[in-house]
Image: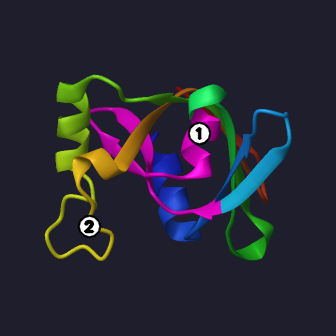
């Protein structure tokens, strides 16, 4: 998990793919990611179409490219953190809660999703697969 996180950090922005209620794909650049207590999270501010799409269908794919034709693809389920105590804990450790963050938001203005059933594949000079 940490190696995948580090790759995403090194690659910069990644692209998150979801589907809407009609089954149409939607891909957008994304940047939020966090590991907390052995769990991998992404997040979005509210209201957003991506929130509606993730809430309706938890299947996601993430793609990111590095230098030299190195790329990462992550297939996962994105499960919303709905328990208020857990959401507060995740929020408190996020960049949204930092007083000096340009992305500062109140807890009710953000949603957090834990990535589960993850298969991440790094392609390049060699292939490497990560699961959790």
Q: Nearer the viewer, residue 106 or 73?
A: 106
CA gap between label 2 and label 1 equals 21 Å
**Eye-nearest disc, 2 or 1:** 1
Residue in the image at 76% along x and 74% along y: 68
* Above or below, comparing residue 95 to residue 75 in the picture: below
Residue 49 in percent (x, y) is at 61, 49
Residue 37 in percent (x, y) is at 26, 33
The circle drawn on residue 7 is none
The circle drawn on residue 104 is 2
The circle drawn on residue 52 is 1
**Disc 2 or 1, which lies upstream in sequence?**
1
* Above or below, comparing residue 106 to residue 102 in the picture: above
Disc 1 secondary structure class: helix
Residue in the image at 26% along x and 53% along y: 94
For residue 85, side relative to residue 128 (left or right): left
Q: Magenta stretch containing residue 47, yes or no?
A: yes
* Above or below, comparing residue 90 to residue 105 in the picture: above
Q: Nearer the viewer, residue 104 or 77?
A: 104
Extent of the magenta region: 29-54
Residue in the image at 19% along x and 58% along y: 97
Q: How many marks are shown on the rendered structure?
A: 2
Quadrant hosting residue 121: top right
């Amino acid at each position: 998990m940490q190696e995948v996180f580090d790759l995403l950090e090194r690659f910069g922005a990644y692209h998150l793919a979801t589907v809407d209620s009609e089954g149409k794909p939607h891909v957008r650049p994304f940047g939020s990611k966090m590991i907390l207590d052995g769990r991998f999270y992404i997040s979005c501010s509210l209201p957003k179409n991506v929130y509606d799409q993730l809430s309706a269908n938890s299947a996601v794919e993430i793609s990111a490219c590095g230098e030299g034709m190195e790329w990462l693809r992550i297939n996962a389920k994105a499960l919303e953190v709905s328990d208020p105590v857990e959401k507060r804990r995740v929020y408190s450790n996020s960049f949204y809660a930092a007083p000096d963050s340009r992305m500062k938001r109140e807890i009710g203005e953000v949603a957090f999703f834990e990535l589960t059933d993850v298969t991440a594949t790094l392609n390049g000079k060699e292939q490497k697969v990560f699961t959790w």
